[in-house]
Image (spheres, helix red, strand yellow):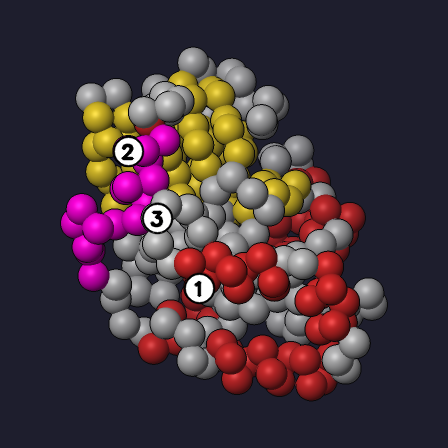
Amino acid sequence: MLTQFNTLAPGKSLFFASDFHLGAPDMLSSRVREQKIIRWLDSIESRAAGIFLMGDIFDFWFEYRRAIPKGFTRLQGKIAALTDQGIPVIFFTGNHDMWMFDYFPEEIGVTIFHNPQVLEVNGKRFFIGHGDGLGPGDRSYKFLKKIFRSRWAQWLFARIHPNLGMFIAQKWSKSSRISKMGKEEFKGEEEFLVQFCKTNEQKDHFDYYIFGHRHLPLDIPINENSRYLNLGEWVNYSPYVAFDGHECTLLTFE
């Protein structure tokens, strides 16, 4: 459980964003998006008690022992400036950047989580994470996720020279759904994260469920006292969630 945000100071908020997919569909459009993300961070900096980046920040990420993917230095520099000011930045790894290890904590001062977490702020309970692998169905992905997150899979990929490894990753990235620039369609009652929230709510109450992964900005009531918010993505949208100590609001930047 995250405990450092139990109480927010007046005028301060928590901010949540996800699925920047930097690197997709190409480096030129990715650079424009990266600059927009930095403008967003600039705009919330004075009000931020904490910033949660909820996965798939990069369309691919792998940390070799002495090498990281090329690019994204502007975002890394901005995050370092935020943490140097004492503003906590928390990363949740997604299915595209699950191979994130110690570089960001040691070099930039962020906190990394690989699994969903419980957050309690001003008496409100949050269940937060990237969202992949939750809910019913999608057994093939859940099986692949276990493989990719295993130590032996990470060890095997690390044996590939970075030049080849990054080339393979870029080819794979171009076939991903976000690289095709299409918008996801809402699936109503079949939304797997809605089903997860409803099932979980029967066992344990949360005021807010906040996830990414689904690529649609969503604000859906689970019951009278619980809401599910999805953070969407920044290729077609620019959504984020702000919690001001009283309630969560789904917003759009620029």
User: Residue type at mark 2?
Assistant: Lys
Tag 3's secondary structure?
A: loop
Disc number for residue 140 = 1
Disc number for residue 136 = 3
Disc number for residue 80 = none
Foreground residue among 78 and 18: 18
Residue 254 drawn at (x, y percent) = 31, 54
Foreground residue among 180 and 131: 131
- For residue 116, side relative to residue 134 (left or right): right
Is 8 inside the magenta-drawn segment? Answer: no
Question: Label 3: how many residues lie within 10 Å, few (<14), some (14-19) or many (20+)?
Answer: few
- Residue drawn at point x = 25 percent, y = 66 percent: 183
User: Which of the marked residues, 3 or 2, is nearer the chain's N terminus?
Assistant: 3
- Residue drawn at point x = 51 percent, y = 60 percent: 143
Of labels 3 and 2, the one closer to you: 3
- The reply to whether discs 3 and 2 touch (Cβ–Cβ < 8 Å) is no
- The reply to whether discs 1 and 2 touch (Cβ–Cβ < 8 Å) is no
In this picture, is 72 found above or below 49? below
**Which residues make up the magenta segment?**
185-200
User: Which of the marked residues, 1 or 2, is nearer the chain's N terminus?
Assistant: 1
In this picture, is 214 found above or below 207? below
Of labels 1 and 2, the one closer to you: 1
User: Residue type at mark 1?
Assistant: Ser
In this picture, is 130 found above or below 35? above
* Disc 3 from disc 1: Cα separation: 12 Å
Foreground residue among 144 and 211: 144
